[in-house]
Image (tube, helix red, strand yellow):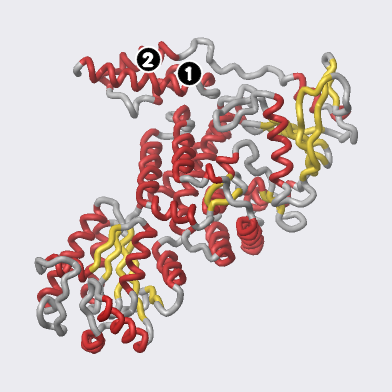
Amino acid sequence: MPSSILLIKSLRVILIVHSISCSHYTGYYSLDHLCNLFRIHCKSEWTISCIAALCMWYPLHMAATPLTKMPPLVSALLRPDFYPHKPASVELIQTHISWVFLAGPLVYKIKKPVDFGFLDFSTLRQRTWACTEEVRLNQRLSRGVYLGTSAIYRRGASFSLTPFGRAVETAVVMHRLPVKKLLSTLLANGRATVTQVRKVARRVADFHKHADPALPRFTRFSALEENLRENFQQTLPFLGLTVREEDYLQVWDYNRDFLQRRRALLEKRIHDGRLRDGHGDLHAEHICLDRGVQIYDCIEFNPRIRQGDTAADIAFLYMDLLYHGHPVLALELMEEYLQRTGDWEVRLLVPFYACYRAVVREKVEGFRLADPAIGRREKTAAARRASRYFALASQLSRRDAQPRLLVVGGLPGTGKSSVAETFARRLGAEYLNSDVVRKILAGAGPGTSFPAPVGEGIYTAAMDELTYREMLLQAGNSLRAGRSMVLDATFSREWWRRQTRALARRSGARAVMVECHCPVNVVRKRLEDRRSRGGVSDARWEVYRAMRRHYAAPGPDVVRVNTVRPMEEGLAEIAAAAYPF
């Protein structure tokens, strides 16, 4: 290998190692684990340079050392006599960012002094701000749960909730919710019902409708790109531990490609005001079916993570229901949410955001592996959960990455081109119009007019056959490359429809047949308007009447779109067939 290339590759590894070694969680992994991180970047021939880079940047004192005892503050809060209401006992629950003390009917929650980059609780001021924000924001989706914040004081070795000494910490104070009514508990016990999940969907839908718009700095496409990059960068330390390298690359490739394909749709939703100040951490553990639907513990520490597309919010719970093995409830959740919001575009986005959220949950569970305050048994369980979450992310991405072949047919003047072109643009799919293909085959430009009766000029049976063959050839090339395709043609013969279905099967694509229709008087008016303004199609009223006599109606498996209705309704029906939950 030329020395210049070796130098460049070595510098790349050094930079990667440095960026990871500067993070909070790297210190809890062995040198062997860090070496595993770079097998996807490195070839065996320059392993020596990789090891040299690791040795340069990896501090020798960073081995994980579990805590043998709790910090004094935590020990103080574990004593029942610490609290004014004197609970019979106190139970401690730890997350990667908090200590949660269950003290009888009340809950006290304090932030760990950690810095994960996207979250910084390293100072008392930042933790106090986060506590205040937690109370304020969670009152949007819960009633009477969050009671406020309480300062914790210290004098010498003693801690107290009553003012004495100096304030050293801030706690969030909550009413304790019944564990048996948590959605996570109901799911685990097999007692969650469709009625309950639909109630949650309506609550979230109404919340999204009235939530504040996202701040301008979070309504840029670059904000989503930043979240995505950060998510995968912070997953790197878990390669070989909870994430298989091949799965990591596959999921990353899917996410990157999705942003490219669906950029137009994602930016449209920004323009349409679909980005809101949401919850940001909407999974089953944060939903309690007590006195209605209580949803709590939203993301308070970083508005960039909380504010985003409403599809990203509901996708979190959809993903979590799948993770817990309840696909039927996941389906019911989404169907109720779509019925309540009318936001059919969510279908095109939920698989992506559900995959993204599964990676988030894997990362959060992975952070627990690096926490010295968490015991070995808990870490083992966290590692299992993390692996399952990333496996789900991989499954979701593979399913969504399957290309779609959408065949939009119907007689002239029924609006099929408008429907097909609009759906292709939203989907980020390639689009083929039979009139354009036919004229290119004839050696003319798309705008060239060839008025002729059916069976004459460029509209002979032989030219029809050539046009459809060319469309299927181009569609096959796109499908085999993993790209979805929308075909726009009359598809008046069943034989051509069968050919498209066979192509989809051979290419591993999902085929959706669509027939556009409308009343005859509407068709006639549209064709008369087309004569005056021109366009790609040469079809006129006489052509419609001739084609109608020989048109073979498709079978029952077709999506029939009445183009007199609002187009969004027809697009929603097509999306439901192409992207079922």
Residue 410 placement (x, y as % from top left): 30, 78
Q: Residues within 10 Å of mark 1 (few under 14, many from 20)?
A: some
Kind of residue at badge 2: Ala
Secondary structure beneath label 2 = helix
Residue 272 placement (x, y as % from top left): 50, 58
Q: Which residue is situated farthest in the front direction here?
A: 532
Please name the residue shown 80% across and 42% down the image.
147
According to the picture, the residue beneath numbered tag 2 turns out to be 53
Residue 197 seen in render: no
According to the picture, the residue beneath numbered tag 1 turns out to be 30
Please name the residue shown 76% across and 48% down the image.
178
- Residue mark closest to the camera, 2 vs 1: 2
Q: Residues within 10 Å of mark 2 (few under 14, many from 20)?
A: many
C-alpha separation, residue under disc 2 versus residue under disc 1: 15 Å
Residue 183 placement (x, y as % from top left): 66, 51
* 222 or 498, nearer to the observer: 222
